[in-house]
Image: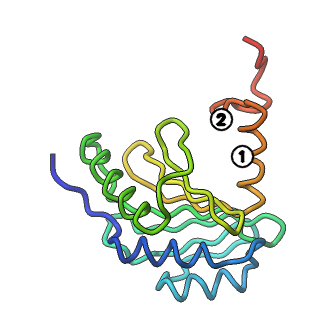
């Protein structure tokens, strides 16, 4: 197992600091200034999202942001190399979780093994291991509130709305 390249602890700290200090909803102009402070380079902007290159030391340094009602709703940041090695991905995720915990404290909870931290500003930060890489997912207050409501109602996070009978 080779160690995967990943975002540095300083880069993780900067992302945490940036997103714990914003006010939601985060407008496009405020997000543009935040991205510039983080050193992200604009790649593409559309009506539904914004893409940046993070400059992090990973093989696909992408940042994809979802826009809803002219505000940033979710930001997905690649924080590890892409890899087919599940052990290396687990190791990178553990290191990244340690870096996040050093800044945000212990996780507030987890779903399917992916930890998340509730932010005082109403947002939420997830560390998600997906096939082939580790992602940092920042959710604005609106998206985070929907997830919290679904959790309170006991709605399965893996279900696909409208995909058929949910009654088993």
In the drawing, does residue 10 fall left or right of residue 138? left
Q: At x 72% / y 46%, what residue is drawn? A: 147
Residue drawn at 41 percent across, 53 percent down: 134
Q: Secondary structure at mark 2?
A: loop
Q: Residue at x 53, y 42 (%)?
A: 110
The residue carrying pointer 1 sits among few (fewer than 14), some (14 to 19) or many (20 or more) residues within 10 Å by Cα, namely some
Tag 1 secondary structure: helix
The residue sitting at the top extreme is 168
Would you place residue 98 above or below residue 26 in this image? above
Q: Earlier in the sequence, mark 2 or mark 1?
A: 1
Q: Which mark is residue 133?
A: none
Q: Residue furthest right?
A: 69
Expressed as whole percent of the image width and height from the top left, the position of residue 114 reads 48, 44
Marks 2 & 1, CB-CB < 8 Å contact = yes
Residue 86 vertical placement versus 33 (above, below): above
Residue at which label 1 appears? 147
Relative depth, front residue between 130 and 104: 104
Mark 2 — residue?
Answer: 157
């Amino acid at each position: 197992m080779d160690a995967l390249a990943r975002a540095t602890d300083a880069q993780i700290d900067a992302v945490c600091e940036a997103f714990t200090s914003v006010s939601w909803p985060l407008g496009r102009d405020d997000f543009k200034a935040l991205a510039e402070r983080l050193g992200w380079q604009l790649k593409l902007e559309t009506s539904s999202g914004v893409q940046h290159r993070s400059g992090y030391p990973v093989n696909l340094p992408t940042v994809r942001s979802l826009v809803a009602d002219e505000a940033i709703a979710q930001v997905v940041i690649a924080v590890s190399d892409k890899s087919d090695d599940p052990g290396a991905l687990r190791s990178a995720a553990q290191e990244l979780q340690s870096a996040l915990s050093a800044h945000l404290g212990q996780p507030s909870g987890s779903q399917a093994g992916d930890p998340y931290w509730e932010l005082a500003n109403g947002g939420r930060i997830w560390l998600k291991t997906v096939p082939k890489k580790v992602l940092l997912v920042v959710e604005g207050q609106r998206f985070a509130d929907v997830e919290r409501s679904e959790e309170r109602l006991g709605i399965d996070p893996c279900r696909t709305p409208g995909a058929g009978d949910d009654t088993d």
